[in-house]
Amino acid sequence: MHWHEHDVSSKGVRERRFDIVRSGRTVPSLLWTPAGAGGPRPLVLVGHGAAQTKSEAYVVALARTLVRHHAMAAVAIDGPVHGDRRPGGHIDGSLVMLEFGQRWADDPGLTDDMIRDWQAVLHAVQGLDEVGAGPVGYWGLSMGTILGVPLVVAEPAISVAVLGLWGLTGPTSARLAGDAAAVACPVLFLVQWDDALCPRQRSFELFDALGTGDKRLHANPGAHSAVPPQEFLATAQFLADHLVPAEHPTTAEAASA
Amino acid sequence: MHWHEHDVSSKGVRERRFDIVRSGRTVPSLLWTPAGAGGPRPLVLVGHGAAQTKSEAYVVALARTLVRHHAMAAVAIDGPVHGDRRPGGHIDGSLVMLEFGQRWADDPGLTDDMIRDWQAVLHAVQGLDEVGAGPVGYWGLSMGTILGVPLVVAEPAISVAVLGLWGLTGPTSARLAGDAAAVACPVLFLVQWDDALCPRQRSFELFDALGTGDKRLHANPGAHSAVPPQEFLATAQFLADHLVPAEHPTTAEAASA
């Protein structure tokens, strides 16, 4: 891990910037942990959407919620051709979207490279005393689902996932369908009802294809990017329910009424 | 209100049986309130599904959750041709289902009579010191949605609703579509992914038709009747978030991360 100078703490959350270098690839990463606390603790891998970066406002807000309210750790990395993977750093999102589309169509290694990037980052972060080898969750919408479904299947440490805002469409849809069938962990799947980038019917097909019986779908009105704040909080609570022992809900709560 | 002898308290929840008589109709009702506590407090009207009754296990469990965990009151009434509306009381569900189907097809007053029944019960219950004129929510799935959507539109006191497990189908689908468009309050809408009684596409159409912008859809795998216990708890929390002042969530929680 090559640590950058960026190391800031606010309201009990420490945010650090590091790189992992593997096979000549540099994987730019951001880590959030409780300030001044040791491990082990649950860890959530956060995959951002296309044309965005690891330091997108909603990524940071989600990571801080996971740390502050649920005492977990969180790590985000830049996607392919995104953010600090670019020689000059993050640029205009429309151009990144265009380049990602080209890479996605042309390069069959795109998904597998991202899986190996994530696994290298996971290994490194769990080697830190303040994280350790706790349970692991994955959170990724849109491009974070395109690249995340294969990751969830490939990485056995991942035991719960938040996915959505994408469906069985695009250059990798056949792989996505196959990997979806192999997903065996609990999943919360988000759909935006009026999504023009990925029509809801395509997303329903991906939800349908998920092999796990422990899945649920939450849909909200609005466009692709209009996931409401309450739904973000619900995803954090869902991950905590599965990763933090003290927050495990039981059906006994219902039965005890 | 004609009170029956049935008046039992358990774990802080008092359950009482009463009838309302209006225009020659008797409306059999069950009321749940916190034992020994005064009002006013929020009230939830609970509409059961076809072939069931006001004392169905899940209705009682939900009502008790609303009272015990959220300090609300709850009231349920038997649906048309259901439960204690029958001269001999509740009988085999299949026969009730058949009779309800006939009445639903034949009698245009079925829905309006139920609206007036609910309004009479609401008025009576809010006249009790231990309930009072607090905010009101509606909870009803399947037949509870068929009859509930028109009620939510007709009764201005209702400010939040849990609906679902039905769609734009059946003898009253045209009215349902029209009333859905007039729903203006927050709605949580449930869908069972493998629902054979009401295929999910029909339910999606009803969700789509809801006029309120403040709506969300939760879908779970399984058959019509297989709503998971956690989802029942989520519906209770949703109602509490909107009806109990102390439980109002704020987007500031997310922003404060």
Image (cartoon, coloured by chain):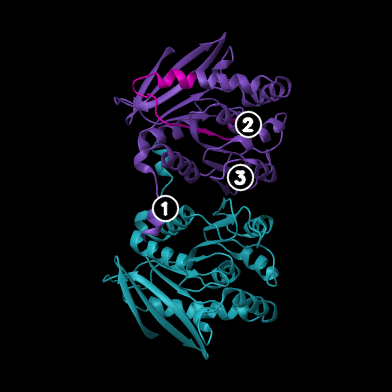
Chain colours: A cyan, B purple
On the image, the x and y values in percent for residue A58 come to 46, 64
Q: Is residue B137 magenta?
A: yes
Q: Nearer the viewer, residue B172 or A239?
A: B172
Q: Chain of mark 3?
A: B
Discs 2 and 1 carry the same chain letter:
yes
Discs 3 and 2 carry the same chain letter:
yes
Viewer-nearest of discs 3 and 2: 2
Which residue appears at 54% of the width and 22% of the height?
B78
On the image, the x and y values in percent for residue A167 come to 65, 62
Viewer-nearest of discs 3 and 1: 1
Q: Secondary structure at mark 3?
A: strand
On the image, the x and y values in percent for residue B16 come to 40, 20
Which residue appears at 36% of the width and 39% of the height?
B245
Tell me the kind of residue under disc 1. Thr
Q: Above or below — where is A8 with respect to A195?
A: below
Residue bearing mark 1: B251
Q: Secondary structure at mark 1?
A: loop
Residue bearing mark 2: B146
Please report the bounds of the magenta region as a residue range: B121-144
Q: CA distance from mark 3 to mark 2?
A: 16 Å
Tell me the kind of residue under disc 3. Gln
Q: CA distance from mark 2 to mark 1?
A: 32 Å
Q: Nearer the viewer, residue A180 or A238?
A: A238
Neighbour tally class for label 3: few under 14, some 14-19, many 20 plus, Cα within 10 Å = many
Residue furthest to the top: B24
On-image quarter of the N terminus of chain B: top left
Q: CA distance from mark 3 to mark 1?
A: 29 Å
Residue bearing mark 3: B192
Which residue appears at 52% of the width and 70% of the height?
A48
Q: Nearer the viewer, residue A119 or B166?
A: B166
